[in-house]
Structures are given as C-alpha cells and as structure tokens.
Image: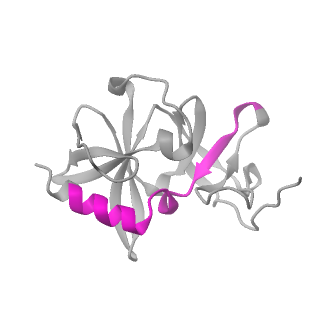
Amino acid sequence: METSTYDTAAPAGKYLFLEIGGDRFGIEILRIHEVNGTQALQRVPGLPGQAIGALATRGRQLPVVDLAPRLGVISQVDDWEQYVVIVEIDHHGERALAGLLVDRVIDVRQLQIGQIEAPARDDDGLLAGWAGSDDRRAALLDTDRLLSTENLDLLLEAVAAVR
C-alpha cells in the first residue's frame, strides 16, 4: 500500500537535531528558546499525559514532557544524561514555553527546501517533514502538535503551583 504525502513540508532553515531512543529528530531552531541539563528538573507525580515535571528557568516554572513515550520510542540513557529543550508552542494564539526531555542534542544544521520531504498523510500529525539520507534520516517535529491545547492548559496550571 502506497502512502501519500502532504503537499507541504517543513520550511527551509536551521534545525536543532537531537536523539531520542536511538532515533533522530529535528526541531526548527526558531522554536528553540534554550537547552538545559536535567539538574533543575523537578519531577512531579500525577501530571497528565507524558508530563514528568517542571523546570525553573528565568523566573518561570515550565512544564516538561518526556518525548520518548510521546513518539513511541524508549529512552536509552540515564536521567542525568538527558537534556530539556525549551520550545515555543502556539497556545490560544500566543506563545507558551514547554520543556521537551530528549536523550541527546546532536547539532544545528541548515536545511534547504530540496533536503526536506513532506510527511506521509498517515502519520499522527507530529511530523513536519523528513530530512537526511536513508541511513540517517531525521523526523522533523511540529512543536505546535506535540501537546494538545487542553493538555497544555492542564500542565501550565499544574506547574504554576510547583515551588
């Protein structure tokens, strides 16, 4: 069965490439606010979805989501080796910040239009495209779709209470 692709792919530009569970992913650099270690990550039990806690940065508490289960992979590193990538997410027409737990940060690369393939129509909406060669392909993530609006509302409310 042949899968069709969307008409548009992720935009050309710089991407931060990272690894989760041995798989490579990319996030448009314009969406990256900062990258932190996990030393300041405060685990909070009972958060919805794949949320694992809060990270205090620049005077704010930000929700942190474990991307491994969200993407259907298993983390292959210890907690202390992981990173939290703070990204901007569209939330009710405004920008909200959230942390994404990843195994490894690889590098930043410039991608041209011809280097980006549109995602297949049968993906779950998390992908903005594909980049790279067959032996080292990377899935380009759509940060706005990683968290639902309802889930982000709950997370922002829950981490606001964390001290």
Looking at this rendering, what residue extends furthest in the left direction? Answer: 163
Position of 108 compared to 119: left or right? left
Tally the numbered discs.
Answer: 0
Depth check: 31 or 155 in front? 155
**Quadrant position of residue 149:** bottom left
Depth check: 113 or 105 in front? 105
Position of 139 compared to 100: left or right? right
Position of 66 compared to 38: left or right? right
Residue 32 percent location from the top left of the image: 42, 52
Question: Residue at left 55%, top 44%?
Answer: 71
Asked if residue 136 lies in the magenta stretch, the reply is yes
Residue 74 percent location from the top left of the image: 52, 31
Q: Main secondary structure of the magenta part?
A: helix
Q: Is residue 129 above or below residue 100?
A: below
Question: Residue at left 52%, top 34%?
Answer: 20
**Quadrant position of residue 41:** top left
Question: Residue at left 49%, top 51%?
Answer: 29
Looking at this rendering, what residue extends furthest in the bottom direction? Answer: 93
Image: magenta residue range: 135-158
Asked if residue 40 lies in the magenta stretch, the reply is no
Residue 61 percent location from the top left of the image: 20, 52
Depth check: 123 or 144 in front? 123
Residue 63 percent location from the top left of the image: 29, 52
Position of 69 compared to 10: left or right? left
